[in-house]
Amino acid sequence: MASADTSPSQCKEERNLLVNACRPVIYGRSPSADCCQRVRVSHVECVCPYVTPKTASIIGVIGVDNVVKKIEGCGRTVPRKFKCGSITTP
């Protein structure tokens, strides 16, 4: 569900840009400057509905704590006990 100022097509584009920029993070790399920029500007309303159980299982291998640290390392705060799709942050 997109926020009032973000259309479904804009959300789809946001997700695609985020996934493409941050894909190397899944393989253990540090986020690039481009990935961090996408992390900072992406709307959670566009991303969280697509964190499916399959996506959660991939993130689970990396470790939710590790992913949260990488996101916060990009300058975006992640609230404790925040539910994003199939994941709840510690």
Image (cartoon, rainbow, N blue to C red):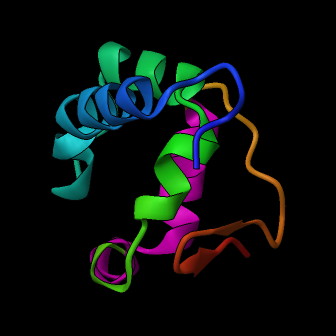
In reply to whether residue 65 is colored magenta, the answer given is yes
Camera-nearest residue between 61 and 38: 38
Circle count: 0
Quarter holding residue 60: bottom left
Q: Is 84 positioned to the left or the right of 35 in the image?
A: right
11 vs 27: above or below:
above
Residue located farthest toward the right when viewing the structure as drawn: 80
Q: Residue at x 16, y 43 (%)?
A: 24
Quarter holding residue 65: bottom right
Quarter occupied by the C terminus: bottom right
The span shown in magenta is 56-73
Q: Residue at x 30, y 23 (%)?
A: 32
Camera-nearest residue between 12 and 39: 12
In reply to whether residue 40 is colored magenta, the answer given is no
69 vs 63: above or below:
above
76 vs 62: above or below:
above
Q: Is 83 positioned to the left or the right of 29 in the image?
A: right
Q: Position of residue 18 (x, y in %)?
A: 33, 33
Q: Is 90 positioned to the left or the right of 6 in the image?
A: right
Camera-nearest residue between 30 and 64: 64
Quarter holding residue 61: bottom left
Q: Position of residue 30 (x, y in %)?
A: 31, 38
Question: Magenta region, mostly helix, strand or loop?
Answer: helix
Q: Residue at x 38, y 27 (%)?
A: 14
Q: Position of residue 8 (x, y in %)?
A: 44, 35
Q: Position of residue 71 (x, y in %)?
A: 55, 41
Q: Residue at x 46, y 15 (%)?
A: 37
